[in-house]
């Protein structure tokens, strides 16, 4: 890719003249913080969007793909951050459907898939309905699908962001085998250990430009981090400061023998009990899909509790409305930015989304106050928003969306904060900033219930750490009292 420039229709300049050379058979990392332009660059390679200017060559030939199906014909496939499988179809149906775009019949498509699985020793249950499969297996299906379609260049966009540590390790092993078979891999990430584990060479993007490219072994982690975040490296240093552990205060939130069902009506939380105190971060570790989301949603009032009690500041809140719980001082930052923000609304409206009642005068929303709040959030949390409070939330990069959501709830100085995956998909600097915001709130007395699939984050932030397994809290104690092995066992078996 040569001299690639991309200006989005709204005027955002995502790429400012990027050169990228990926050699046949290598595993190449695209490293960069959120908003650096990694996904944009790969969407161009994959034919999903067109560059404003610049040249793309694949296998030596000029490539202007008319769309992903066209790219696939030339051997380029992409596995997205959000998987693109049809959830209610079986694995076989998904593979057959994808390969039909290449003119292959179902029988031939499935034969190819079986062959790929055989060669790689990959297991993917062809008859299973996709939504019943763990996300790690779904991702494997995406890879099988791409290879069955004849991919010779495989692009993976932050593939581990949706995986548990065990699933991630399994993915790395699959990638090792693909490399042995001579496949070319382009691997987008912002996690340094993954760069070393997966890649031979690395290209680092910052703000739409290439700042370095070379062999991974020629860089230290510190160099990579600095290249990635540039002048904000200072934040990283601060993030490493040891933190004090404050004594535990009054209980703020208690759940007792809570039972909650998931969207499909299956039991998700199955008798969970916990107490959260003033001025503590109570971390919840667990493999995704063990009831974490349902637990937080039930406490926030977004999902009914089938059995058990939720006590907020001494009052039984089990059947209170969401607004009443929020008025008591509860705040919630969901694991998905699509749940926490209205992407089509601007920052001003998004800023008051979870406290609109205090921005209402005589039945009308106070526009000036909303704009002022958005300005304060932009300033205080360093949100990059080209049109200020009038910027559409959907046009922000993921990191800036997360800062907006976190800042909005932090500004309310909540007594109790429920937060899930606060740094999911963020680069090191943005993640450090979000963690500082959370730690700052805790130091001011907020009790924080923190769900995260990032164990390092939990170990660093939590005053106490609980483990959830199949909807039950199977352990609670200070993080330093666990061994890593014990934690792994609790998370994957429910007992050590
Ligand atoms: N569809 C879009 N419209 C406008 N701006 C966009 C769009 N997609 C991404 N951007 C912007 O382009 C820049 C690069 O984004 P992206 O390629 O997603 O970065 P990365 O994948 O490195 O996080 C960011 O500023 C982002 O906000
Ligand atoms: Mg991206």
Image (cartoon, rainbow, N blue to C red):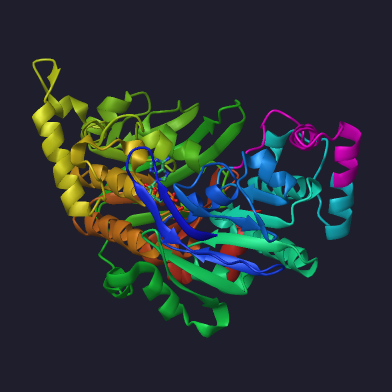
Please identify the quarter of the rendering in which residue 234 is found: bottom left
Q: Position of residue 447 (x, y in %)?
A: 29, 50
Chain part drawn in magenta: 83-112
Residue shown at 39%/73% (left/top)?
227
Report if residue 98 lies within the magenta region.
Answer: yes
Q: Count of labels shown?
A: 0
Please identify the quarter of the rendering in which residue 33 is found: bottom left
Residue shown at 37%/75% (left/top)?
226
Answer with left or right where residue 397 lies relative to residue 445: right
* Relative depth, front residue between 286 and 236: 236
Is 259 situated above or below 333? above
Quadrant in which the C terminus is drawn: bottom right
Is 350 situated above or below 220? above
Report if residue 394 lies within the magenta region.
Answer: no
Q: Residue furthest top?
A: 363
Residue shown at 47%/82% (left/top)?
220
* Relative depth, front residue between 293 and 425: 425
């Amino acid at each position: 890719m040569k001299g690639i420039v991309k200006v989005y229709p709204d005027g955002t300049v995502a790429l400012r003249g990027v050169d990228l050379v990926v050699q046949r058979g290598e595993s190449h990392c695209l490293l960069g913080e959120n908003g650096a332009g990694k996904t944009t660059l790969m969407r161009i390679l994959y034919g999903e969007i067109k560059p404003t200017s610049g040249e793309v060559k694949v296998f030596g030939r000029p490539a202007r793909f008319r769309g992903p199906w066209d790219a696939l014909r030339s051997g380029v496939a992409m596995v997205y951050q959000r998987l693109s499988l049809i959830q209610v179809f079986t694995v076989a149906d998904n593979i057959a459907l994808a390969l039909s775009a290449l003119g292959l019949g179902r029988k031939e498509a499935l034969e190819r898939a079986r062959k790929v699985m055989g060669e790689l020793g990959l297991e993917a249950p062809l008859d299973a309905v996709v939504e019943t499969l763990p996300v790690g297996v779904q991702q494997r299906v995406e890879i099988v699908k791409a290879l069955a379609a004849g991919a010779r260049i495989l692009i993976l966009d932050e593939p581990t962001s949706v995986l548990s540590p065990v699933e991630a390790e399994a993915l790395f092993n699959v990638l090792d085998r693909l490399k042995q078979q001579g496949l070319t891999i382009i691997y987008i990430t912002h996690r340094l250990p993954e760069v070393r584990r997966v890649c031979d060479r690395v290209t680092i993007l910052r703000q739409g430009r290439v700042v370095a490219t070379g062999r991974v072994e020629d860089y230290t982690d510190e160099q990579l981090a600095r290249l990635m975040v540039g002048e904000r490296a200072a934040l990283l240093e601060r993030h490493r400061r040891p933190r004090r552990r404050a004594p535990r205060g009054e209980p703020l939130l208690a759940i007792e023998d809570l039972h909650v069902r998931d969207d499909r009506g299956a039991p998700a939380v199955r008798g969970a009990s916990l107490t959260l105190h003033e001025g503590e971060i109570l971390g919840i570790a667990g493999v995704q899909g063990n009831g974490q989301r349902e637990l937080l949603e039930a406490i926030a009032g977004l999902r009914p509790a089938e059995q058990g009690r939720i006590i907020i500041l001494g009052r039984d809140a089990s059947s209170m409305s969401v607004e009443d719980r929020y008025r008591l001082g509860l705040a919630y930052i969901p694991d998905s930015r699509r749940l926490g923000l209205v992407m089509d609304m601007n920052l001003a409206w998004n800023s008051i989304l979870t406290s609109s009642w205090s921005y209402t005068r005589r039945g009308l929303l106070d526009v000036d106050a909303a704009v002022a709040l958005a300005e304060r959030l932009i300033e205080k949390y360093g949100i990059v928003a080209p049109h200020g409070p009038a910027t559409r939330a959907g046009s922000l990069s993921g990191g800036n969306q997360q800062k907006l959501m976190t800042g909005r709830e932090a500004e309310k100085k909540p007594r109790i904060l429920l937060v899930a995956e606060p740094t999911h998909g963020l680069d090191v600097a943005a993640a450090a900033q979000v963690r500082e915001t959370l730690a700052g709130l805790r130091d001011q007395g907020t009790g924080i219930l923190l769900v995260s699939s990032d164990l390092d984050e939990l170990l660093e932030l939590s005053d106490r750490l609980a483990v959830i397994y199949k909807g039950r809290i199977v352990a609670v104690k200070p993080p330093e009292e666990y061994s890593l092995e014990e934690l792994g066992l609790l998370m994957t078996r429910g007992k050590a």
